[in-house]
Image (cartoon, rainbow, N blue to C red):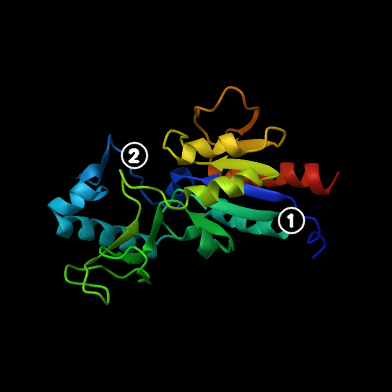
Amino acid sequence: MPYQLNMKKLVVLTGSGISSESGLKTFRESGGLWENYDVMEVASPAGWDRNKEVVLRFYNDRRAQLRNASPNDGHKGLADLEKYFDVQIITQNVDDLHERAGSSKVLHLHGILTRARSTGDPDMTYDIGYGPINPGDTCEKGYQLRPDIVWFGEPVPAIEEAATLTASADIFAVIGTSMVVYPAAGLIDYVPKKNPVFLIDPNDVAIPIYRHIQFIRDKAGTGVSVLKERLLKEYLLS
């Protein structure tokens, strides 16, 4: 391919806005409820301790929904950009739509639905695809399995790797995230000051006033196409 040498590193932070275009619902819809579930009851250690069956059923439903979802033009557009840039995606989403679209470098900050984890040994994880986790499903050590998801109140193990990647970005883009959920929202502070930052979102997004942001006020599906056009013109066709 003609653009393999000296590729610019494009680091992209994605949030729920890109996956919602594939029909996946988000944690912050309907005032903190998701299909009548209180988020803290299904996405916190306390909720797990109170009712493991409800939590497992909730994520089993999400996994089944994901099985029938497809990557949209936003996911596909980012995968296509790998022809021209060294693309690294940092996603707050727990779906696998970036991978299914063809992106080869995806860091999941908050875990992923298609993996289970031992409640007794966090290093023991299992690829489960879109199947359920049931009460009584255990790891080799006999501990109950749980979704390999970072819940509210838990540390985000991948945040240091994400910060390192962001600090190495030649170009940084934010797609479909409100920039209010920390620590992910703080990643923009690691972008080298001289390097461009793009933000794709149809809505107003709170950003640091000291950064110059190039806004693309559109949904992810069409916004990524605009981003591609701008990047090719700026870095490859000029």
Q: Whole-percent x and y of residue 59?
A: 28, 58
Q: Amino acid at mark 2?
A: Arg
Q: Quadrant of the C terminus?
A: top right
Q: Residue at x 74, y 56 (%)?
A: 84
Q: Cα distance, mark 1 to mark 2? A: 34 Å
On screen, residue 238 versus residue 180, left or right, reads: right
Instruction: Please name whichever residue, 133 or 191, is drawn nearer the observer in this view of the structure.
Output: 191
Q: Amino acid at mark 1?
A: Tyr
Residue 168 visible in rendering: yes
Q: Tell me, for residue 136, which label it has, or none.
A: none
Position of 96 relative to 47 (above/below): below
Instruction: Please name whichever residue, 229 or 152, is drawn nearer the observer in this view of the structure.
Output: 152
Q: Whole-percent x and y of residue 161?
A: 53, 52
On screen, residue 237 versus residue 143, left or right, reads: right
Position of 95 relative to 181 (above/below): below
Residue 71 visible in rendering: no
Label 2 residue SS:
loop
Q: Which residue in the protein does label 2 denote?
A: 28
Q: Residue at x 24, y 56 (%)?
A: 58
Instruction: Please name whichever residue, 217 or 156, is drawn nearer the observer in this view of the structure.
Output: 156
Q: Which residue in the protein does label 1 denote?
A: 84
**Which mark is first along the chain, 2 or 1?**
2
Categorize mark 2 by other alpha carbons within 10 Å: few (<14), some (14-19), many (20+).
few
- Considering every residue shown, the one lying at the far top of the view is 209
Position of 121 relative to 223 (above/below): below
Position of 227 relative to 212 (above/below): below
Q: Quadrant of the N terminus?
A: bottom right
- Considering every residue shown, the one lying at the far left of the view is 50
